[in-house]
Amino acid sequence: MLGLLLRVLPFWVREPLLIALGSVLGVRISYLAVHDHDLVAAGLAAVFLLFTAVRVRLVVRALRARRNPAPAASADGAPGDAVTRAWAQAQVTAPVTAHGAAPGAAPVATQGTAPAQIPVPPPAGAGSPPGPAAAEKEPNPWGQAVAAVAVFGALAAALWLAPRVLPDDVNAPRPASCSDTEDEALPAAYAKTPRPVTGDELCEALNRPDLARLLGTPSEIATSASGTSNTAALTDGKVAEPEAKVTFDTYTVNLSATYNELSTAQYVQLVKIAGDEVEKHLKTLTVLGRPAFLSSEHTMKFEISFGGEGSSGPVQEGPLARTLSVALDSKDRGGFYDITVWSESGALPDDAVLLGIAEKVLPTISDRSAL
């Protein structure tokens, strides 16, 4: 499309437009090359600036040619005034005809001499020397230059206004969607559990459009979202434990459902037995009319090496995570949801953030909870 426009545009529109584009790109890339110390960008900037210099020289030569036009050339390349002089000389030295007169000359009698031949100018319009055809009137170069600047300004305005005029859903990056694992067979524990949810269902409930706003980072979008239908560890595959995870640049949110017979009250007792360090972060409360508690625990960090001389590193203590555990039902007959938030930097949101997520997310899956 650009090549077609450059071929169609007149000279005095095309060249100023190319000079403007080459200048802007050359200066911008030069700045980036100096700022980033990039040799490739420096070479590219030199190419643009050289291209611009060539176009400027071409325009300058064209302007000089218009101000000082050269003599028109004849068909064989000789200047037009040379052709005129040759024609005049041919008229003066024309050979005498058999009757003693040159073509186009009148005889004049003189005493004792032969009649001299005086050239007679040819009639008007007859035998006139060849000359250049009248040059067609060309457009005003200044007008074309102004038109080029107008075209360039229109293109720049269109590029600047496009993100503001187009709908937001066209320009905004798309958030991550939940992976589809419906074709995978569920573990046998799900068939033995009354009305369990799957990892995909938890992912759809957690991956809400307003989740980033609930986390306090409204400008972020989800970079990944996934759900798995697993079973709880150390239960020999007898306890269903689906989970979902949504990752942002700042925080990662995990939602899981554990379908066991352990109530939240019993779970709180187990947390207290774990030690004073865990107990001081423990806080009991009620969420959506159900028993709940807040707890903190460090995540696990480990490295896996695929090939090479290095090997997998030992398991290390990762950043602190904050978890809100909510009973599956108001009677606390066993089982709970866990909403966990953590970040790579170790920063954690306020507890009110977890409560806000629970109040928005859990009601969307409450009808599928165990009775």
Image (cartoon, rainbow, N blue to C red):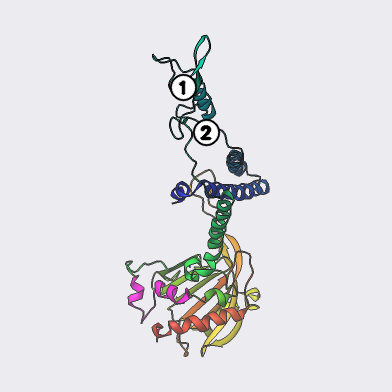
Residue 118 in percent (x, y) is at 51, 21
Looking at the rendered structure, which numbered label has been put on residue 105?
1
Between residues 278 and 125, which one lies in front from this camera angle?
Answer: 125
Q: Amino acid at mark 2?
A: Ala
Q: Amino acid at mark 1?
A: Ala
Position above or below: 347 against 146? below
Tell which circle, 2 or 1, labels the residue nearer the N-terminal end.
2
What's the magenta region?
A: 187-208
Query: In this rendering, would 322 be left or right of 119?
Result: right
Instruction: Please name the residue shown 44% across and 72% down the image.
Output: 203
Position above or below: 153 against 282? above
Is 2 magenta? The answer is no
Instruction: Please name the residue shown 53% across and 52% down the image.
Output: 312
Q: Residue most toward the top?
A: 112
> CA gap, disc 2 to disc 1?
31 Å
Q: Quadrant of residue 355?
A: bottom right
- Asked if one can make out residue 52 in the rendered structure from this viewpoint, the answer is yes
Query: In this rendering, would 227 be left or right of 28?
Result: left
- Asked if one can make out residue 314 in the rendered structure from this viewpoint, the answer is no
